Each structure stands twice: as structure tokens, then as C-alpha cells.
Image (cartoon, rainbow, N blue to C red):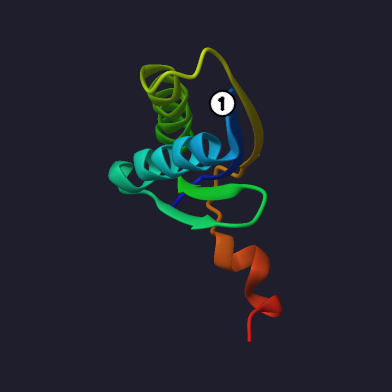
Amino acid sequence: MANALVSIQIIPKAHSSEELYSLVDAAIAVIDQAGVKYEVHPLETTMEGELSTLLSVIEKMNNKMVELGSPNVISQVKILFQPKGITMDTLTEKYRP
């Protein structure tokens, strides 16, 4: 079972809204390619997995933004670390239809 939930809002510097959306799509693609469970929400994306793996994904996301031309990146991160295990469903099941 996963031991962490990590939410990230990545804000790469971009010259236009279109470029910004393209960069954010590329950041989400990095998460997808990592093979971790995740959910995209309007203001952030939440990942579920082992903390060390998720922190590595965040590093790859930031590197990808720079590789694609962003001169800098702001990453706002929230971490829930629970060694006994945690899932997104555990925290949100009562709110799901």
C-alpha cells in the first residue's frame, strides 16, 4: 500500500496562456509516464505512492519544464506521509457518489 499522498500545483513561467497550458499538460504527462496513481483537479494534481517515488516525479516534472523552455518553475507541494499506508479513496470515499 502507498505511504504518501502528494499534491502538486506546478506553475512554469510561460509567455502566454497557451504555452502555460501546454507546459502543464507536459508535467501531467510526466506523472502519467511514472505509472503512479493520480487524479487531476482544477488547481492541483494528487499522486499516490511511495514518498521517495513521488518526490522523484516532482523533480522530473520540474526538469521537464526547464527542458521545454521555461526559465523557472514554482512547485507548490502538499504531502501526507502515513507509514502504515494511505490512499486517496480513504480520504474522499464519503464524498463520492
Please, what is the three-letter code of the amino acid marked with disc 1? Ala
Position of residue 93 relative to residue 84, above or below, is below
Please, what secondary structure does the residue beneath circle 1 have? loop
The image shows a total of numbered marks equal to 1
In the image, 17 versus 81, the foreground residue is: 17
Percent x, y of residue 45: 56, 49
Q: Which residue is mark 1?
A: 14
| Quarter that holds the C terminus | bottom right
Percent x, y of residue 29: 36, 44
Left or right of 57, for residue 71: right
* Residue 56 falls in image quadrant: top left
What residue occupies the far bottom of the structure in this picture? 97
Q: Residues within 10 Å of mark 1 (few under 14, many from 20)?
A: some
In the image, 32 versus 12, the foreground residue is: 12
What residue occupies the far top of the structure in this picture? 71
Residue at position x 58%, y 32% in the image: 16
Residue at position x 63%, y 75% in the image: 93
Residue at position x 57%, y 60% in the image: 88
| Quarter that holds the N terminus | bottom left
* Residue 9 falls in image quadrant: top right
What residue occupies the far right of the structure in this picture? 95
Percent x, y of residue 77: 64, 33
Left or right of 9, for residue 1: left
In the image, 21 versus 10, the foreground residue is: 21
Residue at position x 43%, y 17% in the image: 66
